[in-house]
Structure formats: C-alpha cells, structure tokens
Image (cartoon, rainbow, N blue to C red):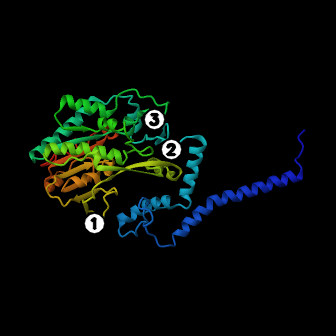
Amino acid sequence: MATAAPDHLRAAAHATNRVLSVLFACAIVLPLAVTIGWLALPHTDAGNPDLAPWPAAPRSVSSLGKWPTRFRRWFKDHYAFRRGLIQTHGAVLLRGFGVPPSPTVLIGRDGWWYYTDDGAMDDIVSAVPMPRSEMDAWRLVLEDNRNWLAEQQVPYLFVLAPDKHLVYPEYLPPTVRVLGRPRVEELTRFLEERSTVHVLDLRPPLLDAKRSERVFHRTDTHWNNRGSLVAYVEVMRRVARVRPGTPVPGRHDFDNVSFVGQGHDLPRMLGIERLVAEEILEVSPRTPRRARVIEPAGGRIDVPQARVVTEHPDRSLPRLVVFHDSFMVPVIPFLAESCSRCVFLRQRALDPEIVRAERPDLVIHQIVGRKLQGTPPGVATPAPGGPRQR
C-alpha cells in the first residue's frame, strides 16, 4: 500500500513547480515583450544589413498585401534574444555532441566544414552520374553563347569553380563515401571531347597550389584569398591569349598575410560564428591597388553586389564583362587591377544588352560545380538578337 509523501516534500515539490512555471512563462513572455517594445522605437537598418528591414508603410493595395510577409521577416530577424538562443543551441550541439545544429553543414576532420545544401551533398557523394541529357543541354547553351559572342567579335571563356570537397576530400568525415565522379569532372571531359568551347577548369591549378599552402577556408564554402589568387592568375593567362601583351601576375607579386579570426559563412549561417575560430590566410599586393569602383556609387570592391563596375587608370588594359556567382566575388579585387574597365554581374545567364554596351575584349562566364544540376541558364527560347535565354 502506497504511503503519502511527507508534507515537507509535497511543499517542496509544489514550490519547485511554481518556480519552473514562472521561469517557463518568463522564457515565453520576456522575449516577446522586449520585441514588442522595439515597435515603439525608430527603426533603422544601420546595425546589420543582413537583417530584414522594418517594412515601410503600405502606399497601395498591392504593397498592403505584401506588408504582413515583410513584417514577419522583420519579426523573425529581430526577435529579442534570438541570436543568443541560437548560439546557445548551437554551442550545446557542437561542443556537447560534436554535431552541427543544421543538416546544411557537414563537420569533417581537423576543423574542416562542408556545405551540404543546394545539391552539394549529392555532388559530394556522386552516386548518380550526370545525365547525358543535362551535359548536352550545357553544351548547347555554352556553344550558343560562344557563337553569339563570336558574331559580336567577342571571345568567350567558361570558368568552372570546384567545390571545396573536390580540392580537400581528405577532410570529409569517414562516414561519407564517394561513389562516382563529380559533375565538374564529367562535364569538363564531355566538353573536351564533344565541343570547342573554351573551358577553364580551376580544379587542377588549385590542387597543385594546395601542395604548398591552404587555398580554401576551413569554415567556408569558398576558396580563401590565396585560392582567389590562383583563380585570378589562371584567368589572366587566358586573357593574355586574347590580348597578347597583357601582363600576367605571379605568386611572387604578393606577400603572405595571416591572422586568427572567427568562423566564416558556414558557422555564420548557423549563427555560431563566434564559437568557431580559424586562421585566415590572405595575400597583400606588393604594389598599391589603383582600380576604383565606379558602380555602385560609394561602393566597396570587397562587398558582394549584384553589379560592380571598376575602372583602372591604365587604359591599355583589356575590358572584361564577367557573369558569375559567389565564388568570383573574392576574385574581383584582383581582376580589377588587370582591366581598364570590368563589369561584374552576379547572375547565371548572359545579358546581350550589357555585352553590346560594353564591347569587352572577353566575356567570362563562371559557375561553381554544384550549380551544374538541372537546367542550365538559357535553354528555352531564342531571344531576338542574342543567345537563347531561359
């Protein structure tokens, strides 16, 4: 027969429950109350451009319909204590259990992190070969771009940037098993055998450079400053073929710089970059930089933008138009020093109007390997006076 708990134990249990109830209520109500309190204050976005801005007052029926969605984005980004809660959650999982707080990141050996979203994990494993239909689609689009540019008397260079797992596969977790060839390798071989489009595969020079120095960030999806220099030198070698006499830089033109900083984009997307440290490897040019940003007005050359235009006082240097993704962003400061005018456009498909307006000496079209899945940019219907656009 069960006996009743002593009165002092029942009282202690009730007191504990009351304290836990109050703490739970505070955990729920306090962040909401603080967030609502912010609504009475002026709202600016000077603090962090990555956060959703306070939605402007609706001035039309259409903007009124969009206002709730914009408010939800603002509320999500500015919810009180959000960053601290995210960091606490990440610290518990990362330091307590050795796992990332999101499946979009894969933690490998010796402090190496890998990106697994956006089809990257499929490319890491390479279990399914790149379909012949997709490779043919890429060939047709690239040849169409090349042919149209040839009509404009502008050469075309297609640049493939490798994902980090292709340059540093040795740091992948032992549980990851690579089953086949990556898309970059398959498409490059296919184009070499069946097309005359000029393709620059940056994987071989990066693999060669990694023998003497690290060319990718440990905690970022992208190459580091020294890997960007490798890409820059290889691109300029191709530019010199189009414009003989164009100076080609070398590794000896730059000094090494290194320092310890916080984690890069992979821990940053999890909100835990302050919990991770990395040695940042960079280079410094031995001659002063002379290029300047023309567009956007007051823009910085090292800040990602949808469109960046640079000019150099040496007007004898070539003119370039570069269509690119995020991998080309850290290369922009290098390339700007080697062209009289560069137009960098962060987009997948070529823009005929930009080419006509700029009349460049070379069009560079850069894409990272994990973006080779599915429909390539520009296969649907022919655009009047230009290559086929999607």
Which numbered disc covers residue 102? 2
Is disc 3 surrounded by few (<14), some (14 to 19) or many (20+) residues within 10 Å? some
Residue beneath the point at 23% across and 50% down: 322
Provide residue 210's location: percent of width, then percent of height: 36, 38
User: Where is residue 296, by image quadrant?
Assistant: bottom left
Amino acid on which the number 1 mark rests in the picture:
Ala
Q: Which comes before the other along the chain, label 2 or label 3?
A: 2
Residue 8 versus residue 60 in the image, above or below: above
Marks 2,1: beta carbons within 8 A: no
Read off the residue under disc 3. Answer: 171
Read off the residue under disc 1. Answer: 297
Q: Which comes before the other along the chain, label 1 or label 3?
A: 3
Provide residue 207's location: percent of width, then percent of height: 34, 35
How far separated are the C-alphas under marks 2 and 1?
A: 38 Å
Residue beneath the point at 62% across and 62% down: 29
Marks 1,3: beta carbons within 8 A: no
Residue beneath the point at 87% across and 47% down: 5
Instruction: Label 2: state its secondary structure.
Output: loop
Q: Is residue 163 left or right of residue 271?
A: left
In the image as oriented, which residue stretches furthest toward the top? 179
Instruction: Label 3: state its secondary structure.
Output: helix
Provide residue 179's location: percent of width, then percent of height: 40, 26
Q: Nearer the viewer, residue 206 or 60?
A: 206
Q: Nearer the viewer, residue 198 or 148?
A: 198
